[in-house]
Amino acid sequence: ADGHPNPSGLFDVKHDAGGMVDVEFAVQYLVLAHAADYPQLTADLGNIALLGMAEALGLLPAGVGRPAADAYRELRRIQHRERLAGADAARVAADTLQAQRAAVHALTRAVFGAQRVAQAAEA
C-alpha cells in the first residue's frame, strides 16, 4: 500500500489491505514455499485455481481457499469494470466488499500468521 498511496478514503480493490495484491502475494508465497513437495502447484494455473488446489492439498485450512478465490474473482471483476469505464484506479466506497475483504484477510492470516499480518498493517 505504501507504493500506491490512497488518500481518497475509498477502498482500492487492487492495492489496499484486503485487496487483490494481498491474494496474489499469498498465492505466490504458497507456490514458492510448497512447490518442491507439491509440483502440481507449478502448473500454468491462475490464482483462483491455485487457491482451490492449496486448500485441497491441506496447505490452507478448510474454508479459506474457496472464499478467498471467490473474493479475488469479485475484486477482479470490479477492477475490470472500472478500467473499462476509464478509471485510473478501481476504488469503491470503503464500507463495501466487507465479506470479500474478510476472506482475503483470513487468507493472509492463514498463510502468514496473525502476528505478521498485524505488523504489516501497522507499517
Image (cartoon, grey):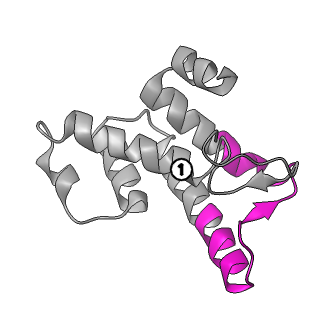
Please say if 6 is above or below 75. Answer: above
Residue 96 is a magenta residue: yes
Drawn side of residue 44 relative to residue 58, left or right: left
Which residues fall within the magenta stretch? 75-102
Q: Amino acid at mark 1?
A: Val
Residue 37 is a magenta residue: no
Tell me the quadrant of the picture where the C terminus can be found.
top right
* Residue located beneath label 1 in the image: 21
Q: Position of residue 62 (x, y in %)?
A: 45, 37
Residue found 40% across the figure and 58% down from its top: 47
Tell me the quadrant of the picture where the N terminus can be found.
top right
Drawn side of residue 46 relative to residue 19, left or right: left
Counting labels gives 1
Q: Position of residue 55 (x, y in %)?
A: 37, 43
Residue found 78% across the figure and 52% down from its top: 11
Q: Quadrant of residue 71?
A: bottom right
Q: Which residue is situated farthest in the top direction here?
A: 115
Q: Position of residue 75 (x, y in %)?
A: 64, 62
Classify mark 1: residues with Cα within 10 Å, few (<14), some (14-19) or many (20+): some
Nearest to the observer: residue 69 or residue 23: 23
Q: Quadrant of residue 82?
A: bottom right
Q: Quadrant of residue 120?
A: top right
Q: Position of residue 32 (x, y in %)?
A: 24, 40
Residue found 43% across the figure and 30% down from its top: 111
* Secondary structure type for disc 1: helix
